[in-house]
Structures are given as C-alpha cells and as structure tokens.
Image (cartoon, helix red, strand yellow):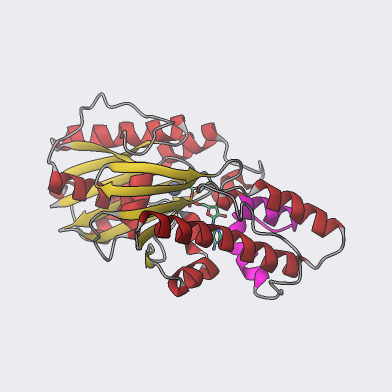
C-alpha cells in the first residue's frame, strides 16, 4: 500500500511517501529564509508559499520514490493543530488529490505524526510515555492504548524549542535557535553560568522555560561569555526535560518513552536520554522536524488498524487536543 502524506501546519512544506510501511520519499521545503526578516512565521506568507510549492513537492516526492500518482492508494494531510491558513492549504490540496485519484483521504493529528516519526524504524505498542518538545509544544502524555493520550504535564509558558530560539536571539544567533545554541555550546562550559533547573522539586509534570530566557538576558548583561551561557542553558533545559520524564516514568511504572519534535534533534538531550534509566525511542535524524513522511506513516498505521476514510468535509483544526483527532 502506498500512502502520500502532506504536512503544512506551520512553515515547512512536507510531502512524504510510505510504501509497504517503509518511508520511500520525504521532501521538505523550509520557509525559514522567507520569514527570517520578520522574526517569526507570518501565517499569510506561509500559506501562499505552501500553495506555490505543493504541486512541485508532490512531483518531487513521487519521483524520489519512483512512483506515479496513480499508484498512490491513500492520501493523508495534517488537520491540526497549527496555523489555520497553512493547515487549510495542505488539507484542501490533499482532499483534491484524493478526490481526483479516486482514493480515500485521512486527516492526521500533527503530534501523532511526530509520535510515528519517532517510531519510524522501530514499531512500539502502548503503553508508553510521549514527550513532544518543539517550537510550539512541550507536552508529556501517558499513552495506555493507541488513540488514548492522557496529558500529564505541559509547559506553563514558553515551549522548550521556543526557549532555545529566544536565548539564541539574546546571544545574537540566528533562527532556528536550537542548532545554533548547540553549536556555540560546544565551545563553552556547561557549569560556568549559574542557571538553575526550572520546576525542580515541584510536584506534577509541568515545565517552565521562560525564566531561563530572562536569566540568559541577565547573564549576558553581566558579561558572561556567550558560549558559556549557551552551554549552561542547554544543560539545564535538557536536565528539566530528562528529569521530569524520569520522574513520570517512575511514578507511572512506565519504562518506554517516545521523544519527538524539533528539540529531539539535540545531541545532549539524546545522549542524556540514552544514558538514563529509560528505554528511549527517538526519531531518526531528518524526521525530528516537521515532515510529510511522519504524516504518511501515521495514516498508514491507523489505516491498518481501522481502514476508515475521513469525509472530504473534515475541517482544519488550529487547536486540536491529542486524542480528539
Ligand atoms: O518540531 P519543529 O520542527 O517545529 C515545530 O515547532 O512544530 O521544532 C522546531 C523547534 C525550534 O524551536 C528549534 O529551535 C528546535 O525545535 N530545535 C532544537 C534543535 N533543532 C531544532 N532545539 C534544540 N536543539 C536542537 N538541535
Ligand atoms: Zn511539529
């Protein structure tokens, strides 16, 4: 079975193809440069760019997979959460493609896409914990069964990726901040700047990252070296994520955790997770940030359990809690 997945929830246009459960194409066009001068994603510009490139991206994905459009059996797209304009572009395109090909269509929850991206190489049956850490989300779920997501904790302010982006801006680095911080941190000392791990010692599983950003501004003003700020910030941000995950796993009697979202690309996070008591499932490099392959994979696995198409009237949902999609 060949599944084509489209992802346009934010500023990346992703088209991926899964054949027989394996990823055979994953084309992503990033709009980072388009939005760079505005300091954030401009939704209307993002929508227009998705519209402009989708046809070509689908062709590129089909070429990469050595397939013709007529060989696609199922068309999927992200239905939410995300920016409503960009979501509508991909969703409407996917519906049109499905209708034109006479094939079924399914809408996919963006975060469930990230979960399957992390499980691309190794399938996993629930129960497990899921941590999504991206530019827009820092959400920790318990997943007792497929489709059941119990929210254990979330960020009270900034998302983890957002904190990397904001600290990077404070240090005069580019966007997205995560890779920039990681690069600069390699030249710094992770104990040189006295950040404290946020929410440590608190009950529950919530996160908070805005205090780190404020502290980074203060440390920069007091003359600490940027590389030391980057390294020390990265250490405590990672410690907050890993510490909370370990505690939740212990409390709930879970050992297996899936970590997904853009921040899952961070090498310190990956190595700390691997060194922890947890059995960790991380997305392969190239599947951490938004992409169409994770949407196709998610749709395929759902279809295998339940071959039920969604109606072509399925709406884009900018705020879609996991478990209700
Ligand atoms: O999942 P994603 O591509 O997009 C959404 O936000 O949905 O995540 C992007 C976020 C950005 O905030 C970026 O700074 C962060 O992930 N990120 C990283 C790294 N690579 C990307 N954060 C820390 N370390 C990285 N290596
Ligand atoms: Zn995402």
Visible residue check, residue 278: yes
Compared with residue 106, is residue 232 higher up or lower down, i.e. above or below?
Answer: below
Compared with residue 155, is residue 20 higher up or lower down, i.e. above or below?
Answer: below
Q: Which of 232 and 188 is in front in this view?
A: 232
Residue lying farthest to the right in this orientation:
222
Left or right position of 84 against 34: left
Residue segment shown in magenta: 163-185
- Does the magenta portion include 177? yes
Residue 314 rendering spot, x and y as whole percentages = 27, 27
Left or right position of 228 against 124: right
Q: Nearer the viewer, residue 201 or 103?
A: 201
- Does the magenta portion include 113? no
- Which residue is painted at 37% across and 60% down in the image? 257
Visible residue check, residue 15: no
Compared with residue 171, is residue 12 higher up or lower down, i.e. above or below?
Answer: above
Residue 259 rendering spot, x and y as whole percentages = 41, 58
- Which residue is painted at 70% across and 49% down in the image? 211
Give the quarter of the figure containing the C terminus.
top left
Based on the displayed image, in which of its 4 quarters is residue 319 positioned? top left
Based on the displayed image, in which of its 4 quarters is residue 82 positioned? top left
- Which residue is painted at 41% across and 55% down in the image? 251
Residue 66 rendering spot, x and y as whole percentages = 21, 60
Q: Nearer the viewer, residue 21 or 136?
A: 136
């Amino acid at each position: 079975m060949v599944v084509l997945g489209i992802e346009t929830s934010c500023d990346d246009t992703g088209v991926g193809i899964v054949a027989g459960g394996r990823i055979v194409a994953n084309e992503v066009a990033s709009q980072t440069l388009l939005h760079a001068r505005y300091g954030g994603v401009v939704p209307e510009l993002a929508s227009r760019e998705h519209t402009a490139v989708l046809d070509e991206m689908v062709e590129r994905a089909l070429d990469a997979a050595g397939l013709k459009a007529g060989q696609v059996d199922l068309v999927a797209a992200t239905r939410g959460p995300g920016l409503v304009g960009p979501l509508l572009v991909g969703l409407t395109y996917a519906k049109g493609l499905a209708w034109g090909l006479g094939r079924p269509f399914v809408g996919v929850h963006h975060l469930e896409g990230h979960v399957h991206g992390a499980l691309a190489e190794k399938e996993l049956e629930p129960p497990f914990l899921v941590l999504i850490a991206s530019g827009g989300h820092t959400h920790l779920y318990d997943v007792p069964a497929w489709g059941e997501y119990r929210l254990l904790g979330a960020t009270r302010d900034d998302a983890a990726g957002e904190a990397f982006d904001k600290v990077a801006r404070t240090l005069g680095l580019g966007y997205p901040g995560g890779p920039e911080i990681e690069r600069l941190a390699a030249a710094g000392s992770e104990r040189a700047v006295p950040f404290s791990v946020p929410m440590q010692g608190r009950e529950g599983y919530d996160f908070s990252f805005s205090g780190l950003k404020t502290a980074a501004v203060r440390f920069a003003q007091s003359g600490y070296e940027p590389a030391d700020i980057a390294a020390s910030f990265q250490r405590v941000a990672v410690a907050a994520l890993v510490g909370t995950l370990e505690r939740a796993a212990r409390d709930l009697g879970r050992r297996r955790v899936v970590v997904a979202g853009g921040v899952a690309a961070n090498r310190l996070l990956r190595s700390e997770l691997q060194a922890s008591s947890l059995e960790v499932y991380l997305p392969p490099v190239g599947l951490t940030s938004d992409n169409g392959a994770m949407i196709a994979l998610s749709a395929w696995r759902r279809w295998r359990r339940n071959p039920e198409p969604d109606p072509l009237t399925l709406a884009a949902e900018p705020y879609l809690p996991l478990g209700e999609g």
